[in-house]
Amino acid sequence: MPDIDLNLLTALDALLIECSVTRAAQRLGLSTSAMSRTLTRLRTATGDKLLVQAGRHMVPTPYALELAGRVHETALSARALLQPAGQGVNLATTERSFVIRAGEGFIDMSAAALLKEIQQVAPRIRLLFTGKSDKEAQALREGKIDLEIGVLGTDAPELKTRVLFTDRFVGICRQGHPLLEMPGVTAERYASFPHVVISRKNKLRGPVDQALDALGLQRHIMMSVPAYTNAVNIVRHSDVIGLVPFTALAWCDPCSELMHFELPVTTPPIKVSVIWHPRLHADPVHQWLRETIVKVCRREYSRHVRT
């Protein structure tokens, strides 16, 4: 079977709508002679006259009338497939699920506001949050997750990123902790108390330890826990010192008797980004979701954080 020129589909749709070679040609920006030749090709392809002369006008054949509805719908579908990405998407009726790998801080700070935004614009979109067991890119590459919110911790140069906000680490301790009995927290006093760290793989050292190394100091890490909420609860009821991003304070209970303080050493800023694989870069619904996350997250960050 010879290949069929799909341009004939658009021409047939125009001819059946206009029932006129001249008007169909004008509709598609062609000459009348070119459209006449196209009609000849269509008649050969279908084995039917399609349009026949009736006085001064042309009328469709019974077969053409049978085809008309299907041809028009197929032509519309073909145009939708071939138009630029993002056009023709109806977010109000789109049904999609997106898996997002994110930490508890993002979920606590932004998920509720994000839900409200989605309900208003794309109520059939479903977000499936999964925990941050690692920062490896493989899950993004394999399509197991569609987006990641966090710090880019991988050597995957192909990944796309967009910074949401810049955070910083602060120290936390219980109210009445002896560390705060004297004004100003020095590096020596900070290192002299026991510490709890947050690590999903029991990695105990981080930027704070590198900064302390430069001063010839080392902190005593007594415990490692997988989540910030664990660390906050432990700090509230003991003399250990914790370390959390400043944004984490936004979802801590203001009545928890938790104190925070600026670190006595300098650590690199925490650039929190939305991260995705290039294969989804032009996906119109994914694009909308990314833009929505950026808008909502920056708004919530500004609302919650007081620097």
Image (cartoon, rainbow, N blue to C red):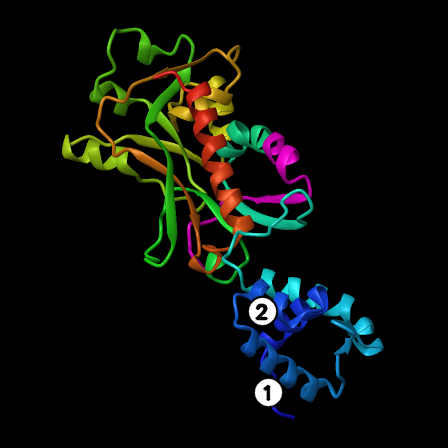
Q: Give the range drawn in magenta.
A: 115-138
Question: Hey, which residue is sitting farthest left in the picture?
Answer: 215
- Measuring from the top left, give residue 71's x and y in whole percent: 72, 70
Which residue is under mark 1?
3
Which residue is under mark 2?
25
Closer to viewer: mark 2 or mark 1:
2
Up-down relation of residue 176 to residue 273 (above or below): above
Quick one: SS at disc 1? loop
Q: Is residue 170 left or right of residue 24?
A: left
Give the residue displayed 67% in from the left and 73% down from the top: 12
Give the number of callouts. 2
Front residue of 183/133: it is 133
Question: Hey, which residue is sitting farthest bottom in the picture?
Answer: 1
Quick one: SS at disc 2? helix
- Measuring from the top left, give residue 47's x and y in whole percent: 74, 88
Q: In this view, does 271 lie to the left or right of 27?
A: left
- Amino acid bearing label 1: Asp
Front residue of 132/233: it is 132
Q: In this view, does 162 lie to the left or right of 62?
A: left
